[in-house]
Amino acid sequence: MMHQQAAAARADFTQEPLEVVRLRIGQFDSFARLIPQADGTQALLEALFLSAVTRSSTAEVDLGPAPFGVIDVSPQPNRLDVHLAGPKAFRPVLDLLPTRASDKTIHGIAGLLARPVRTSVHVAFDHRQASGELRLWTEGADLTELLAEHAAATTARGHRVLWSTSSPLPKPKLLHGRRAVRPLSRQKPSPVTPPVRTSQFLASALLRRPGIWTRLEGHLDLRVSSSEVEHGVDWLLDRVVTPSTAVHDDRIACLLGDAIAGPDLIWDRATHTCGPDECRMRFVPRKAGHGWNGVLTVRTVRAVSDHLPARRPRPFTVLAESLVENKVLPLRPARNGALPSSDRHDPNPGLVVQLESVGYSLSKTSCWKIALHLGAGWAQHGWRVLVVHDVSEASAQPAAYPPPTWPERPRPKAPTEDAPWQRLRLTSGPGELHVHVGSHSWEALEKLIPRARSDFDWIILADSISNSYRYMGPTMLDGITDRFVVAVEDPGYATTIAVASAGGRQTTNLDRHVDLTPAESATVWRERNLRMLASDIPVAGLILVPEGKHPQPPVEFRDAADARLADFGTPVLTRLTSELIFEERTVLDNVSPLAREDLLATSAHLAHLLAMHAVGRSVPSLEARA
């Protein structure tokens, strides 16, 4: 079910044949990112392609109704297969290919190669074919013939073709057996960097998702243009719809803001202007740094002609939509609280679970992964879950020397307050799994959690306070958290203890083993593993991650020791024995049915125990939810 859903979600955006997508998705371990982000060189290639399309749009070259002249794409990190809408859509690529005039002036992009392969053309940078490649093809036409015709026309103009053969790499000049270093005044100037490099990842994200626009209601045409601004390169999409279609469409913000199959752009509502005949929506990338220094604006207008055929809207899997009588309707029902009170019209706010590790028994990464697995299990059971993940906020872009003259200023900051969390995975039911990533102070959590309580059933704080002194022990977030849970790497209960004996004046290191009762073993275990946990913290329970290398005591002994730990105020909630617990794959990814069922049962049992601490509240049973 997860495999089929992920394949459908990706095909909606890329427009690939569903059968092909299913084969490719089957090779994924995780379904967190269904459309991979392009690497640096690959992203620059795609940004150059999109910039060439913008010049064609400015020159009023008709590329057809397909967005950017592209019918479908097949994305990989270092390759993009592009199915062009026709021979006209190949013309912008020809303008990129480098040529040299009689005065030695180079036109086009220096270092770009175009290689004919059967009826398609492969475009890449010289000596960097493995880092990035565009594979262009179309139905009913041979692009290699168009490339040959363009080469003949270039030669007829007296220009030299530079895209057909690879140039040899220059040999380093040696001085006394060592590489000679020229003075700065004698070094050759570095090649001019294309301006689109500043927002190459944004351009690549748009090119890799042509299906966003063709599946919207009333789509007729889409033109793209770009402009150099103080912070980089901005992109403008001019969208034309039928006269009977509304110019504003909320689905655009949902699709561009999706982080699973979409580009994860945040709608800047403050700049939204919408009238009866034109609507402008501005989007800022959530990511910052080199390659993301650009802003996207989508302008929608109505067509002038009244005799154009209306395009039927099509559903998107990431929005959980279905098509009923030519209308797109949501499949997901309205949100129900995870902990409903007797009055179903007034659902209780979500419960906040603070998940911490003591000292260095588990790393922050391990705590995050435990929260991820529990959240995925709860989401699959039908709850809405938010995992708050604390990460250090490093500098988005290192300082360059000498300072660049352009861009002159930083890109506008993304309005993350309008979209504070991102979706992590698709689910097969009404549940949802989201994440909030950032460096969180106490004050930041005090602002975030009240809003999250109203939108989610469960909020998991996975080491969510920025704390450099973890060896001092975790701190409970009073007034923020409802349940304080400790995750511990469990070495198991010891059934004996080694004691050294002494005889006469000299100490003899002859160890003898003394049997322990379950109560004594629990006391020893607690002293070893929880000694850094403050005694005044009301612990809801422990999540134990057993170490496989230690022998485990009999079940009766373990249960008695667990009961003694509960007497100390630290009950054992569950033991996570799944093989996936320290991996990024969850029950919502490509995992074995046995591992999925194991984690689903464990997460459901844990949710029941955590909710039972609330007076008068209970978690609906799985049978009731089914």
Image (cartoon, rainbow, N blue to C red):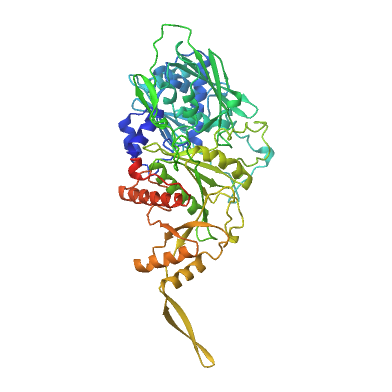
Image quarter hosting the C terminus: top left
Name the spot of residue 446 as percent of width and height, x first.
Answer: 60, 44
| 626 vs 533, nearest the viewer | 626
| 97 vs 53, nearest the viewer | 53
Image-based side of 538 in relation to 320, left or right: right
Q: Is residue 28 visible?
A: yes
Name the spot of residue 393 as percent of width and height, x first.
Answer: 60, 45
- The relative height of residue 159 versus residue 514 in the rendered view (above or below) is above
- The relative height of residue 35 versus residue 567 in the rendered view (above or below) is above
| 566 vs 238, nearest the viewer | 566
Image quarter of residue 559: bottom left
Image quarter of residue 196: top right
Q: Is residue 151 visible?
A: no
Image-based side of 47 in relation to 228, left or right: left
* Residue at 39% from the left image edge and 11% from the top image edge: 309
Image quarter hosting the N terminus: top left
Name the spot of residue 567 as percent of width and height, x first.
Answer: 47, 65
